[in-house]
Amino acid sequence: MSFVVDWGPDSEPNAEESWFVVYESNGQRNVAVARVGTGYLVRVFGVSDYEVGSSRVTFRPLRGVAPTAVEDAYKLAVLPALHQLNGRPALHASAVANDQGAVAFVGPSGRGKSTLAALLSSGGHFRLMADDYLPLHLDRAGQVWASPTSTAVRLRGPAAEQLNETTVFHQGKFVAERPVTPEPRPLLRVYAITVGTDTRVISMKGRDAVAVVAEHMQRLDPHDPELLRVEFEFIDTLVKRVRVAELSYPSRYETAAIEAAIALDLQSDSREQVR
């Protein structure tokens, strides 16, 4: 990312803008975005405003909010969406990687993306790449690459208990450190995770694959035609080069069965290369 970050004066907590995107949870506004001149204003309610220009982000915290809280909100709620402005979109996904490359998991909030990444990266077969968002880019050969963003996973209480390991409670979630993949890795799969009666992988093609990837893109501006055009071209290339599939498994998380299903699915690449 090419954005420079600095700090500005405190924001006015009662100031309202013409929000064109508002994200809510349990009936309360969490994050909102407005267009201001040639840039954007992102408000994380109760924490800070973030003024986004062409190459700079200015933090304008609410009076009395700790700097660490302002920085955490930026990393979780603002930074992922800024990738759209650079034409290198990011997926709202968790991800793990091995020597072959990276696999990403997408799904609705609460579906268990972080839990799955935590479980798979605890056994030594995979290392963590991302807990919440995964930046992507194309190289000159058309290969899709994923970049690491996380050194830990953030979990709800029941998921943390299932891990049966030491965690740290931070900002309403339990944090578990993980071995990480420090360098970008080729993206091998995008798995849309669902709950089913057995563990299996079902490939998606065409419009279904495009719809899954598009649904889980991080966006700062969902209305700008040029940004959306660049994003669609990226998605079209991605689904032609990276297999998108549904990964279905029972809610009890049989880690060994999920690992086996992913390994078998990835082996299909080797079989196709041999033909």
Image (tube, rainbow, N blue to C red):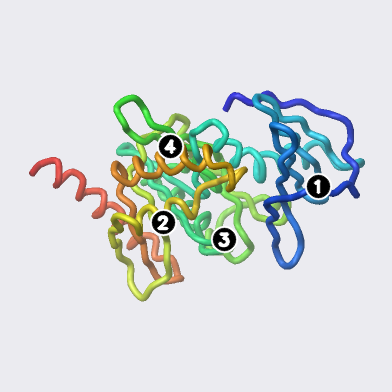
Q: Residues within 10 Å of mark 1 (few under 14, many from 20)?
A: few
Name the secondary structure under disc 1. Answer: loop
Amino acid type at circle 4 is Ala
Q: Which residue is mark 3?
A: 109
206 to 240, vertically: above or below:
below
Tag in front: 1 or 3: 1
Q: Earlier in the sequence, mark 1 or mark 3?
A: 1
Tag in front: 1 or 2: 1
Q: Earlier in the sequence, mark 3 or mark 4?
A: 3
Front in this rendered view, residue 165 or 189: 189
Spot occupied by residue 55 in the image (x, y as percentages of width and height):
65, 24
From the viewer's perspective, tell me whether residue 266 is left or right of residue 6. left
Please identify the quarter of the rendering in which residue 50 is found.
top right
Q: CA distance from mark 1 to mark 3?
A: 27 Å
Tag in front: 3 or 2: 2
Residue ID at (59%, 66%): 158
Amino acid type at circle 1 is Glu
Q: CA distance from mark 1 to mark 2?
A: 31 Å
Residue ID at (69%, 29%): 53
Q: Which residue is mark 2?
A: 211
Q: Which residue is mark 4?
A: 146
Q: CA distance from mark 1 to mark 4?
A: 35 Å
Spot occupied by residue 90 in the image (x, y as percentages of width and height):
51, 41
Spot occupied by residue 146 in the image (x, y as percentages of width and height):
43, 37
Amino acid type at circle 3 is Ser
From the viewer's perspective, tell me whether residue 110 is left or right of residue 15. left
